[in-house]
Amino acid sequence: MDLFSVVGLALALAALVGGSILKGAGLGALWSPAAFVIVIVGTLASILLHTPPSVFKRALRILRWTIRPPTADRGALIAQLLEWSNVSRKQGLLGLEAYVESQSDPFLRKGLQMLVDGVEPEAIRHMLEIELHGEEQQDLAAAKVFEGMGIYAPTLGIVGAVLGLIAVMKNLADPSKLGHGIAAAFTATIYGIASANLFFLPVASKLKSVIGRRSGERELAIEGLIAIAQGENPRNIEARLAGFLH
């Protein structure tokens, strides 16, 4: 679990609620069904309009990476690659066949299977890099869904405020309704700016960092698998992969 994300979300909520209370507006000022419909539902409508269904579904799947990013231990991955290197030097590449089915990561399983099948090193690199690039582009497109929501939400907050002020203008003859009406109008602006800057944009940035780290691990795996295919000494492989630990 990413504790920084959990703490960040908690602090975001505390900042919004606490700020409202300390300013004297109270919790009631943060609740407005009309603002919710205009800003949150409107933002969802906008993102659905410009996002392909497959990308939106992937965005929902990777949202959990904000709190629970894919587990990664580069040291453990290097140790695993070195183990495979030692096995291949003693038993040949066919000796790695027993490790294929037990490998839970589809990317590593594919690379390991190509080693067992005797595919040329450059062909292994080419195919794995294509898969890496395709996976990375799909994940980045999914992360940009939240980035897009962070762009739409503030604008829709302004729309909500304008609509609220229009309603206020219709009640100018009744001064008792003006204060409440103006406050309700600006609630939509709070929804838009707060949701964008406290959730949508930070989530997009966090997902991009997770995707970048994940791609780095894939690159490490590719270099290790190529070194095994080329029959390099395990000590040389360890030295070669050590740079990925920084």
Image (tube, rainbow, N blue to C red):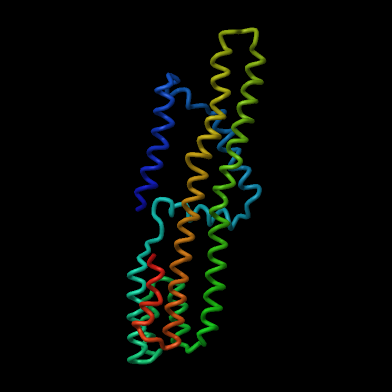
Residue at 58% over, 35% down: 39
Residue at 43% over, 76% down: 109
Q: Estimate the x, y position of residue 71 in percent, counting from the top left.
A: 37, 62
Q: Estimate the x, y position of residue 178 in percent, counting from the top left.
A: 58, 13
Work out whether 26 lies above or below 111: above
Quick check: 151 left or right of 119? right
Residue at 62% over, 52% down: 51
Where is the C terminus found, in terms of image quarters? bottom left
Work out whether 229 lies above or below 170: below
Residue at 66% over, 15% down: 169
Residue 73 is drawn in which quadrant?
bottom left
Quick check: 87 left or right of 122? left
Residue 228 is drawn in which quadrant?
bottom left
Quick check: 14 left or right of 34? left
Towards the viewer: 167 or 73: 73
Give the residue at the far bottom of this rendering: 91
Q: Estimate the x, y position of residue 13 in percent, counting from the top left.
A: 41, 35
Residue 176 is drawn in which quadrant?
top right
